[in-house]
Image (cartoon, rainbow, N blue to C red):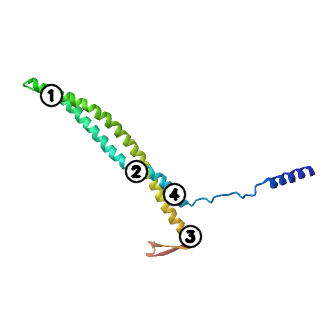
Amino acid sequence: MSKIWIIIFSLAFVGVAFAHGKASKRQPLPDSTKIYEHLIDMEDEDAHYGRNILGIVGGTTLVGLGTACLFGGIYFLRRHDKENNRWDEFVDESTGFVALIFSIPLYMAGIPILAYNVYTYSLRKEHAKKRDVYKRDLKYYNMRHHREKGESVQISLFPSVDVIHGGGGLNLLMAF
């Protein structure tokens, strides 16, 4: 039994002798207000979706022009004149082919622009919603925090109606 005590004391002595004299430098936890403000700033960086609205408008315009060229080209290719004027047929067919050719790059540019901006808009909108939730939670936290630090007594008045006895009154609720 005495050997166990000698081992315990020698281990304690070694632990004390070789321990560093520095106290652990614990940094205090940041205030919840700073945490909320940091979260709001992080979400605010990704919450701007104004450019995506412009991209959606631009992509929709390109797709709309491509659709107009496509249907216009089909219309001019199918259009037959009763007089069978060769020059008019040549102009109609040329206009139809040119319109069809122009519709291809308009679609090829408009569809990816539109798809990218709709997708990015939805992502940024989610960040904006999350930022707004953090702002609301910060506001409630600050209200609760100031209420806890400030008054120690909260008074609330509630009206009461006694239907059976035909009376009424005012109830006072005090919270400490």
Local SS, label 2: loop
Give the x, y percent position of residue 95: 18, 29
Inspect the image, locate mark 3, and give the three-letter code of the amino acid beneath it: Lys
Vertical order, 35 against 102 (above or below): below
Q: Where, by quadrant of the figure, is residue 86 drawn?
A: top left
Inspect the image, locate mark 4, and give the three-letter code of the amino acid beneath it: Tyr
Q: Which of 121 and 162 is in front in this view?
A: 121
CA separation, marks 3 and 2?
36 Å
In the rendered structure, find residue 36 and report the number of the disc placed on it: 4
Which residue: 25% across, 29% down? 101
> Mark 1 or mark 3, which is nearer to you?
1
For label 1, count other residues whose C-alpha is less than 10 Å away and answer few (under 14), some (14-19) or many (20+): many
Give the x, y percent position of residue 27: 63, 58
In this figure, which residue is indicated by the disc labeled 2? 48
CA separation, marks 1 and 2?
47 Å
Residue 103 located left or right of residue 79: right
In this figure, which residue is indicated by the disc labeled 3? 149
Q: Is residue 79 visible?
A: no
Vertical order, 61 against 42 (above or below): above
In the rendered structure, find residue 92 and report the number of the disc placed on it: 1
Residue 166 located left or right of residue 152: left
> Mark 4 or mark 2, which is nearer to you?
2
CA separation, marks 1 and 3?
82 Å
Inspect the image, locate mark 2, and give the three-letter code of the amino acid beneath it: His
Asked if disc 3 and disc 2 are in contact, CB closer than 8 Å, the reply is no
